[in-house]
Image (cartoon, rainbow, N blue to C red):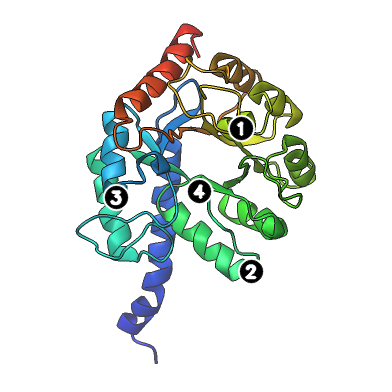
Amino acid sequence: MQSRRSFFRLCAPILAIVVGITSSQAQVETAHRTGGMLLSVQAWTFNQYSAMDAVEKAAAAGSKNIELFPGQDLGAAFPGVKIGPDMGQMATDAFKAHLAKFDVHVVAYGVTGIDKNEAGARKLFAWAKSLGIGILNTESVDAIDTMDKMVKEFDMKVGFHDHPKTNNPNYKMWDPSYIYQLVKNHDKRIGSCADTGHWVRSGIKPVDALKMLHGRVVSSHLKDLNEFTPGGHDVPYGTGVSDVKAILDELHRESFSGSISVEYEYNWTTSLPEVAQCIAYVRGYCDGHKY
């Protein structure tokens, strides 16, 4: 006969998963919103530092949320450990404690590969859910049918991210019309991760791109660039050519409620004041419009 102790030993991992999912759902629900949006900082902004440092810098910039990216070193206390589903429970728990210390929520993760194989995809979604992440950003087009199943199972969203147009005719992610055709017949939790800077580098006005997506935007890497060329670089919101106000107007018109991440890819080691300006710009915009 199976003893109570052996029965508990068998059930404990299942109980831990249930408790983890419950707590992560609560974290998603309580993440700080600005004008209905999850205003955050993309940790890639601080890729010269550890993920622990990125959390502190996001908080110092005035952000209550962060979007993680795969492969960032966790921190000096965890040599060799990188952000992702293989980081292990002890490191994940330590990272959760660090987030809580600085009152920062993880709202998104990307840009990440998503396995076409359900078991591999499920591992990623389960880890993300355990951190309270509600959105995965990717370019894994071949896994879209698997994503359909995962977004239903985990009640999460997936955003297809765009990099700039290249000379490779097979790379189509830069084109918002391609993204819309890709997602339009799939679960509505699957949409675009609108990287506005890469649209500008591809010669597309961000507001035009948003309209081409017909409301299928689930997340954004919001950028303002200094010039409308492939070599344009980030500047504080409202001082460049991307027309950030018009972008925010359009997102509001579409009742956008996803993550909007400041991803600042310039002045890598001294960008904190500019990141803070970007956070303040979005807050000021929402306050001014009473969103």
Three-letter residue code for mark 2? Asn
- The span from disc 3 to disc 2 (Cα, nearest Å) is 30 Å
Question: In this picture, is 123 found above or below 137?
Answer: below
Confirm whether residue 176 shows in the render: yes
- The span from disc 1 to disc 4 (Cα, nearest Å) is 20 Å
Residue ID for mark 3: 50
Between tags 3 and 1, which lies in front?
Answer: 1
Q: Nearer the viewer, residue 98 or 261?
A: 261
Three-letter residue code for mark 1? Arg
Label 3 sits on a secondary structure element that is loop
Answer whether labels 2 and 4 touch (C-beta < 8 Å): no
Q: Tell which circle, 3 or 2, labels the residue nearer the N-terminal end.
A: 3
- The span from disc 2 to disc 4 (Cα, nearest Å) is 19 Å
Q: Tell which circle, 2 or 4, labels the residue nearer the N-terminal end.
A: 4
Label 2 sits on a secondary structure element that is loop
Q: Nearer the viewer, residue 25 or 127?
A: 127
Between tags 1 and 4, which lies in front?
Answer: 1
Q: Which mark is residue 201?
A: 1
Residue ID for mark 2: 117
Question: In this picture, is 15 found above or below 138?
Answer: below
Q: Tell which circle, 3 or 1, labels the residue nearer the N-terminal end.
A: 3
Q: Nearer the viewer, residue 84 or 152?
A: 84
Q: Which mark is residue 110?
A: 4
Between tags 2 and 4, which lies in front?
Answer: 4
- Dot 3: within a 10 Å radius of its alpha carbon, few (fewer than 14), some, or many (20 or more) residues? some
Three-letter residue code for mark 4? Gly
Q: Quadrant of the N terminus?
A: bottom left
Residue placed at 50% from the left, 27% from the top? 37
Between tags 3 and 4, which lies in front?
Answer: 3
Q: Residue furthest left?
A: 77
Between tags 2 and 1, which lies in front?
Answer: 1
- The span from disc 2 to disc 1 (Cα, nearest Å) is 33 Å
